[in-house]
Amino acid sequence: GNSVTQMEGPVTLSEEAFLTINCTYTATGYPSLFWYVQYPGEGLQLLLKATKADDKGSNKGFEATYRKETTSFHLEKGSVQVSDSAVYFCALSRGGATNKLIFGTGTLLAVQP
Amino acid sequence: GAGVSQSPSNKVTEKGKDVELRCDPISGHTALYWYRQSLGQGLEFLIYFQGNSAPDKSGLPSDRFSAERTGGSVSTLTIQRTQQEDSAVYLCASSLGGSNTEAFFGQGTRLTVV
């Protein structure tokens, strides 16, 4: 079946550190891949997405590249800020009639000043 | 409205009682989804609506769970005879429908069954 695996948290970093949150997926066909972010007290928001192999999604300094050969979509940011502290969810969608999202378990990121 | 609205934001109920959770999607969004976020389980898909019909109910965990959508807008998720394992945050999302369109999430209803 379709599934998403992402690294366990929490991840604790100092401000301006480099961030990587690993995400791998299992899916038939060619899913679209997403990173969602949930800031404290807020709803889930789409951070970035990629819809085909080798696409790079980017937003707010975050990037992730759709790697079909390694079935991965790792999230990276060169210099994190305290305001990036949140829970990050990797997800996939097979599209089609339902277009439902299948999520990983989430990774809590805590950035310390 | 400006975003997806869910009510109540918090609900505490006694085991065995029925609860109703409400979702107001973004105006014009034909697709509506319910998800559940629980500790240790992550985010699980429950049900998908296209208009008023639900072509995918595959995520509903038991027959105690049901949902409806009326007028292609508001949706209600009902949990009958609540159990402690139903405690979770229930999230609603809506989108314009079709492949690869962005889903917008509400802030969720935190359900606690005591």
Image (cartoon, coloured by chain):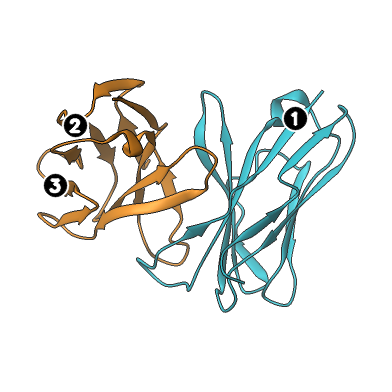
Front-lying residue, B105 or A6: B105
Residue at figure coordinates x 49%, y 37% from the top left: A40
Letter of the orange chain: A
Q: Position of residue A96 (x, y in %)?
A: 39, 65
Quarter location, residue A72: top left
B102 vs B20: above or below:
below
Measure how far apart labels 3 and 1 are at the Cα level: 40 Å
The reply to whether callout 1 and callout 2 are in contact (CB within 8 Å) is no
The N terminus of chain A sits in image quarter: top left
Measure how far apart labels 1 and 2 are at the Cα level: 34 Å
In the picture of the structure, the residue carrying the numbered disc 2 is A20
Amino acid type at mark 2: Thr
Q: Chain of mark 1?
A: B
Residue A32 visible to an observer of this rendering: no
Amino acid type at mark 3: Lys
In the picture of the structure, the residue carrying the numbered disc 1 is B112
Residue at figure coordinates x 57%, y 69% from the top left: B2
